[in-house]
């Protein structure tokens, strides 16, 4: 069996992954989209140990909707990054808002317990009311 050091097609897709959107098919109607990503991984910036989480995203789209395959690849790009629980969830929120500017969004990272500690980080964003 030979060793194949080349980058695999899935790894290339993850490296090229970015959040992309498509037009909201129901602009003007307020509705919620709930997304669960149960296989999130990153690395602890202090120990290097892997961290595992389920990422929960709930948002109300405005003009655009995030494409799910692109979201999957984007989230998978964190697997080899050394990043804290707090920073990763805040970064996902920043990138999500930059991509689709939803009316409102909540992103929650429910991290698997490690060393008897269970962490849940939740961040929110809401568009500013133009009348306020």
Image (cartoon, grey):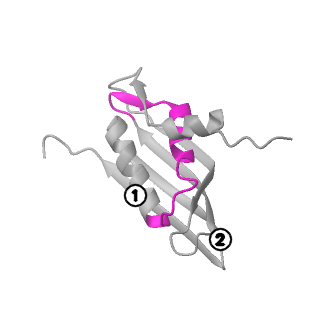
Which residue is the extreme one toward the bottom? 116
Tag 1 residue: 90
**In this orientation, does residue 79 appear?**
yes
Which residue is the extreme one toward the left? 131
Residue for point 66% across, 37% down: 8
Disc 2, disc 1: CB below 8 Å?
no
Q: Residue 99 sits in which quadrant?
A: top left
Residue 30 x, y percent position in the rendering: 38, 32
Circle 1 residues within 10 Å: few <14, some 14–19, many ≥20: some
Which residue is the extreme one toward the right? 1
Tag 2 residue: 113
Residue for point 44% across, 36% down: 19
Residue 20 x, y percent position in the rendering: 43, 31
Q: Residue 61 sits in which quadrant?
A: top left
Q: Considering depth in this image, is 36 or 132 the residue closer to the camera?
A: 36
Q: Does the magenta stretch include residue 65?
A: yes
Residue for point 32% across, 38% down: 101
Residue 66 to residue 95: above or below: above
Q: Considering depth in this image, is 95 or 106 the residue closer to the camera?
A: 95
Q: Residue 114 sits in which quadrant?
A: bottom right
Q: Looking at the image, is mark 2 or mark 1 earlier in the sequence?
A: 1
Extent of the magenta region? 61-86
Q: Considering depth in this image, is 31 or 34 the residue closer to the camera?
A: 34
Q: Residue 72 carries which label?
A: none
């Amino acid at each position: 069996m030979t060793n194949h050091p080349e980058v695999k097609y899935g790894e290339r897709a993850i490296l090229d992954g970015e959040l992309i959107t498509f037009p909201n098919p129901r602009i003007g109607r307020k509705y919620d989209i709930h997304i669960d990503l149960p296989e999130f991984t990153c690395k602890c910036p202090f120990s290097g140990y892997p961290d595992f989480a389920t990422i929960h995203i709930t948002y109300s789209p405005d003009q655009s909707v995030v494409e799910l395959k692109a979201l999957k690849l984007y989230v998978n790009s964190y697997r080899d990054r050394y990043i804290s629980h707090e920073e990763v969830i805040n970064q996902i929120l920043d990138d999500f808002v930059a991509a689709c500017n939803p009316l409102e969004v909540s992103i929650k990272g429910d991290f698997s317990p490690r060393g008897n500690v269970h962490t849940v980080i939740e961040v929110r964003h809401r568009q500013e009311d133009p009348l306020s």
